[in-house]
């Protein structure tokens, strides 16, 4: 679970950097981060059960 959290943090950092540089639209980055963190939450919820 810790590995998934670390990977998610790296992905969020990369998406933020890409959106700030104009590589992708900021709303696109926000949508991707939201979807990623939603998946991470569901994985952690399943592992807690």
Image: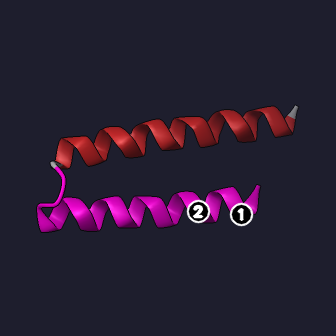
The image's mark for residue 7 is 2
Left or right position of 46 against 27? right
Disc 2 to disc 1, C-alpha distance? 6 Å
**Which residue, as the protein is rendered here, is positioned at the far right?**
49
Q: How is the image coloured?
A: secondary structure
The image's mark for residue 45 is none
Q: In the rendered structure, does residue 16 fall within the stretch colored magenta?
A: yes
Quarter residue 48 falls in: top right
Q: Secondary structure at mark 2?
A: helix
Q: Secondary structure at mark 1?
A: helix
Q: Residue at x 29, y 44 (%)?
A: 30
Residue span colored magenta: 1-24
The image's mark for residue 3 is 1
Q: Residue at x 74, y 34 (%)?
A: 45
Magenta segment, prevailing SS (helix, strand or loop): helix
Q: In the rendered structure, does residue 15 fall within the stretch colored magenta?
A: yes
Left or right position of 48 against 42? right
Q: Residue at x 73, y 41 (%)?
A: 44
**Which residue, as the protein is rendered here, is positioned at the far left?**
22
* Label 1 packing within 10 angstroms: few (<14), some (14-19), many (20+): few
Residue 38: image location, x then y, percent? 53, 35
Contact between labelled residues 1 and 2, with CB atoms less than 8 Å apart: yes
Residue 7: image location, x then y, percent? 58, 62
Which part of the image, by quadrant, shows the N terminus?
Answer: bottom right
Residue 33: image location, x then y, percent? 40, 46
Quarter residue 16 falls in: bottom left
């Amino acid at each position: 679970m810790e590995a998934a959290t670390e990977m998610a943090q790296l992905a969020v950092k990369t998406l933020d950097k890409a959106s700030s540089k104009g590589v992708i639209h900021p709303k696109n980055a926000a949508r991707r981060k939201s979807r990623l963190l939603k998946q991470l939450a569901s994985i952690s919820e399943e592992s807690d059960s």
